[in-house]
Image (tube, rainbow, N blue to C red):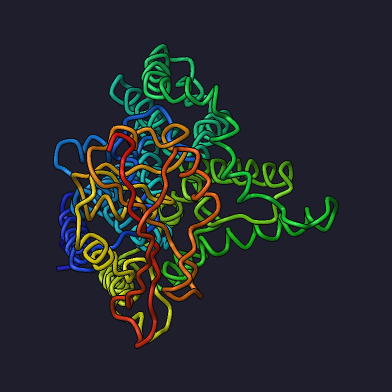
Amino acid sequence: MLERATKTIRTAGLLLAAYFLLNIVLRIALPHSLELDEAEQSSFSQYLLAGYGPQPPFYNWMQYAIVSVAGMSMGALVVPKNILLFLCYLFYGLAGREALKDQALAAVAMLALITLPQVSYMAQQDLTHTTALLFASSLFLYGFFRTLDRPDTGGYLLLGLATGIGLISKYNFALMPVVALIAILPDAEWRRRVLDWRLLIAIAVALVIVLPHAIWLRNNLAFASSDTLVKMAAGSEPAGTLRIGKGLLAFVVAIIAFAALPVAVFAAAFRRDLFRAFSAGNRWTRLMERMMLASLAGIALIVLFTGSTMVRERWLDPFLLVLPIYFLAKMQAAGLDLSGGLRRFRPVVPVLMACVLVALGFRVVGAGLIGTYSRPNVPMAGFAREMTRQAEPALIVASDTYVGGNMRLQFPDVPVVIPDFPVPGIPAYASADGPVLIAWRGKKTATAADAVMPERFSSALTAAGITPQEVGSLSLPYYFGRQGDNFLLGYAWARPRNR
C-alpha cells in the first residue's frame, strides 16, 4: 500500500489529504480554546486592513474572506490552515517533479516534508503566518523550477503569484527571489530566463499583490518592524566579538536543529548511498546548493548587521525547505539504485504522521500528567458561560488579542475590540447599544481575589471614558488539568455612554 501511495504525486496527495483531514478532526475534537495565532486570526478577522501590525497581512486577508462567508467557528480557523499546508506539500511535489524528472521520486520528496519538524509539527501546533510562508515557498519553488525547465507564460505567472504572496506572508521571504537570481547566474542558459520579457508579467503580478500593503508599510515601517527587532535584540550583550560569536553560534545551532531530523531519517533509510552521493551532482543539485548557500550567507550577514544573538529555526523555512528534493537529486545524480532505501523510507512517513497526531493530542489531553498546560487547556468556554450568566454583552473589550480572539469565538455575533487596534482608542464603545463586557488575563500566580486589571489596559479604558463596574474574577480548572491547577481571568461590566 505504501509503495502504491508513493508511485505518483496524485496517490501521495490522497494519503496527505487523509492525513490533514485527521488533523482537522483532531483539532476540532480538542477543546475550543485558541492558540495564540488562532486567537489573533479570530480577533483580526473582523477587519479588512492593508496592515495589521508586525506580520504581513496575507493570512489575515484569507481568514477575513473565509469568516465573512462562513462565519466564525473553530472550523473556519482550522480548515483553511490545513488546506494551505496540503497545498504546500502538493506544490513541493510538483517542484520535485521538475527537478527530479521522476514521478515516484517526486512523490517521495513530497511526503518527505513530514521529516521537517517546522513543517510537520510546529506549523500544525499554532503558526499561521509561517504556514502561509511555507505555502508561498513551495509555490515559488515550483514556479521557479518550472520556468527554468520550460519557460512559458504560466510559469512566469506562478513565479509572480508566489513572490507576491510570499512577500505579504513573511518579510524574510524577500530574500527568496534574490537568492534564486544569484543561483542561476553561473548557468548561461538559465541566465536567459531573466532577460525574457515575460519576467515583466511576473513582476507586475507580484506588485499588484504587494501594493496595498506596501503603501501601508511606507507609513508604518517602525510599527511593522518592532516585533522582529525585539525578537532579534541582543539583550544585554555588549557590542563586540562576543556578541558576534554568540549570534553566529545561534545561527549554526538553528541550522542543525532544522536539518537534524531529515538528515537522520534519510541517513537511516538510504545509509551509505546518501553519503556516497555527496560527491555527485548535476545542474539541479548545483542550483539548489547555490540557493541554500546564498540564503544562509544572507541570513548570516543580517545576524552580523543587527547584532542578534538569537536565530529561530523557522526563520530558515523558505531557504532550507528544498532539502528533501536536494537529497534525492544528489542520489539520483550518482546513478544509485534507490529501491532499498525507498523501501526503508516509506514506512517512516505514516510513523511520523502518527507521531505528529499523537503529540498534538497528548500535549492537551496529557497536560495534567506532564504538568505543562497549552492554550487549548484554558477553559475559555467556561469563562464565557460564567461571565455572562446574568447578561449578554453588546460589546466586548479585551486586554489583548489572545483574550479577544477567544471571546470572539465564544460570542461570534458580538464585536470584540482591543485598545489601540485597529485605531487608537475604543471607538465602538460609544455606539454600543447594550452592556459592555471587559475581560483581561490575570497573573498566573494570582488567586481569584487578586485579578488586578493591567495598568496599560486600565489606562486605555480611562482614556476611552469607560468606567468598569461590577469588577470580578474567575479562577477555573484547566481542561485535563491537575487538581488545583486553575487559570485566572478578570472581568468587569460597563454601560455605554449613551445609556
Give whichever of 94, 76 is nearer the camera: 76
- Establish if 472 lies above or below 7: below
Left-right relation of 16 to 447: left
Please tell me in which quadrant of the rendered image residue 291 appears.
top right
| Residue that appears at 25% across and 50% down | 77
| Residue that appears at 55% across and 53% down | 455
Q: Quadrant of the C terminus?
A: top left
Q: Outermost residue toward the top?
A: 197
Please tell me in which quadrant of the rendered image residue 147 appears.
top left
- Establish if 319 lies above or below 20: above
Left-right relation of 352 to 30: right
In the rendered image, residue 201, in percent from the top left (x then y), is placed at 37, 15
| Residue that appears at 47% across and 26% down | 190
Q: Quadrant of the N terminus?
A: bottom left
In the rendered image, residue 428, in percent from the top left (x then y), is placed at 33, 35
In the rendered image, residue 30, in percent from the top left (x then y), is placed at 23, 68
